[in-house]
Image (tube, helix red, strand yellow):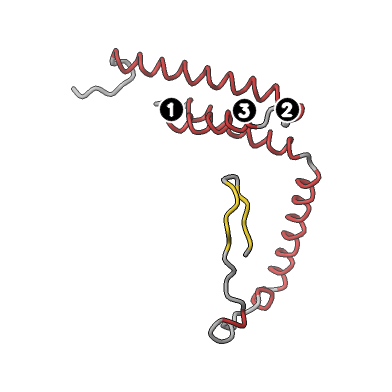
Amino acid sequence: MSSLWTPDGEHPVEPGPSPTETDGPPPEEPQPEETLTPEEREQAEALAREMAAVQEQIASAPASVVVANHLMGFYELAAIHLSQEPPNLSEASVAIDALGSVIEKLPGRLGEAESTLRDALHQIRLAYVAVEKSNRGASSTGVGTDVPS
């Protein structure tokens, strides 16, 4: 029996039936290269080469750099939700919590960007509190809310 590792731990994986254990041969499907025109085949091959180059580039980068890049995406996502009219606090909270969770779980492992990421987390948390406070103030005074007439 095999297992699959996930962030939640190891999970057993039952093997599926082998091709010889299935009911008859698999249905015949046209091979992708048989259905493409020469131009489409050339485009597909170029795309495959481009994807391989991108994968190679990502594989050669330190994981801390790639993770830091994604974490800044969480920061930007939170900022976008906070800047909406009205602010979407629940969605911003998800992005901020994701950012904080990763930063707090990987102390000393995020490379040169770690201090910048910690500062960004602090700033977006402050922004969240300010927006939430402003939003509460506006809704309690009726300013900025749609009040039926």
- Tell me the quarter of the image containing the C terminus: top left
Regarding mark 3 in the picture, which secondary structure is present there? helix
Mark identifier at residue 23: none
Amino acid type at circle 1 is Leu
Mark identifier at residue 89: 1
Classify residue 24 by image quadrant: bottom right
Name the residue carrying label 3: 104
Compare residues 9 and 123 and report the one nearer the observer: 9
Classify residue 35 by image quadrant: bottom right
Which residue extends farthest right? 60
Q: Earlier in the sequence, mark 1 or mark 3?
A: 1
Distance between mark 3 and mark 2 Cα atoms: 10 Å
Q: Where is residue 89 drawn, in percent x and y?
A: 43, 27
Q: Where is residue 105 drawn, in percent x and y?
A: 63, 31
Amino acid type at circle 3 is Glu
Residue 106 drawn above or below residue 22: above
Residue neighbourhood size for the residue with mark 2, other residues' Cα within 10 Å, grouped as few (<14), some (14–19), many (≥20): few
Regarding mark 1 in the picture, which secondary structure is present there? helix
Distance between mark 1 and mark 3 Cα atoms: 21 Å
User: Viewer-nearest of labels 1 and 3?
Assistant: 3
Distance between mark 2 and mark 1 Cα atoms: 30 Å
Name the residue carrying label 2: 108
Q: Earlier in the sequence, mark 2 or mark 1?
A: 1
